[in-house]
Amino acid sequence: MAQLINTPPLPHLPWEPRPAGCGEPIWRYSGNPVVTRDDKPGCNSIFNSAAAAFDGGGSTRFAGVFRCDTRELRMVLHAGFSSDGLKWDIDPEPIRWAVPPGVDPVGECYDPRVVRIGSRYYIIWCNVWHGPTVGLGYTDDFKTFHLIENATLPYNRNGVLFPRTFPAADGGEDYLLLSRPCDAGHSALGEVFLSHSRDLVHWGRHRYVMGRDQPWESTKVGAGPAPIETDAGWLLLYHGVLTTCNGYVYRIGAALLDRDRPWKVVARAKPYLMGPWEDYECVGDVPNVTFPCAALADGASGRIAVYYGCADTVTGLAFCEADELVAWIMDNR
Ligand code: BMA
């Protein structure tokens, strides 16, 4: 039975038990979509968004960064707060970044991830800067947001930090970042790499992690939520894309990465874990998209709640248990 490691208890994790008769390793929240496009007046869509446990005082137990596309169809990030991870108050004002001298301002932003390392929350997103690249910043309070630097040159997307640092040979500690170098479109440059950094500014010691494998992920793959540490390895949820005669289909896959050298894949499930199935996943601005960006985990119970974008329009929530998911990956690798 796999256990979560270095994952604090999260007693208020949003949770529903597996429905009777459901034999799947992951199941959807009965109130899906958990965030709709009406949850912030005047926007077009709220999807591909990230949530994290956050003690904001009062009843605020969660904070998030939401991709709220405007009705001009500009991609904008907004902070949001919640007491239960289900009902969200999304700040009507977009996130404004404090920009260090000499650093270019932030462009349009999409597909944010939020990763807590120590007491600080790091935001990683796709930043439109001479093409898509990996933007990186931090906040301590979800009110003031500090830009660091772009972590990569264009073109790159789906940057995701690991939620802790890793000991290096010289006695220091390195941050680790997954990313997916690409081009301006939907090319075959669709493979996940890992980079090391001592200071979150300079990145190097690049390692190959994984590429396209099964038919459902034959166009490209990209990391989803921050990896979750278990005693069997880092649990990585990712998206995999298939090109069909009628467009792209985005599904969710699951893999385990080595705990100490996470560019080594320990096991990877051949079938997809979850894909467009319900109407809100199949119908929207971009049909047939399930795109995971965040996972909350309760270190005490092993329960995991996954937030994922649905059809580039709304946000869904799904539940799974770490030990069952690890067993499912091992059984289906
Ligand atoms: C990707 C990104 C995602 C989006 C997906 C499907 O390239 O733009 O934000 O969900 O396409 O449209």
Image (spheres, rainbow, N blue to C red):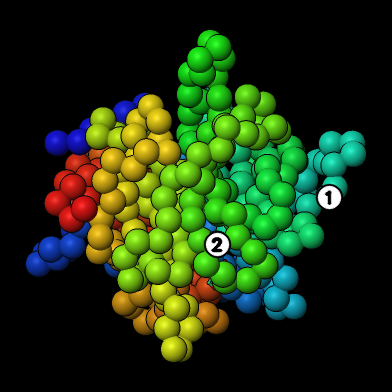
Q: Give amino acid for label 1.
A: Pro
- Tell me which numbered mark, 1 or 2, is placed earlier along the sequence: 1
Q: Which residue is mark 2?
A: 189
Indicate the quadrant containing the N terminus: top left, top right, bottom left or bottom right: top left
Q: Which residue is mark 1?
A: 105
Looking at this view, is 50 or 183 the one in front?
A: 183
Q: Position of residue 238 (x, y in %)?
A: 41, 55
Give the Cα distance between marks 1 and 2.
27 Å
Q: Position of residue 70 (x, y in %)?
A: 70, 72
Above or below residue 305? Residue 204 is above
Residue at 83% in and 50% down: 105
Q: Which SS class for mark 2?
A: loop
Looking at this view, is 280 or 124 the one in front?
A: 124
Q: Residues within 10 Å of mark 1 (few under 14, many from 20)?
A: some
Q: Position of residue 327 (x, y in %)?
A: 16, 46
Above or below residue 192? Residue 142 is above
Looking at this view, is 258 or 87 the one in front?
A: 258
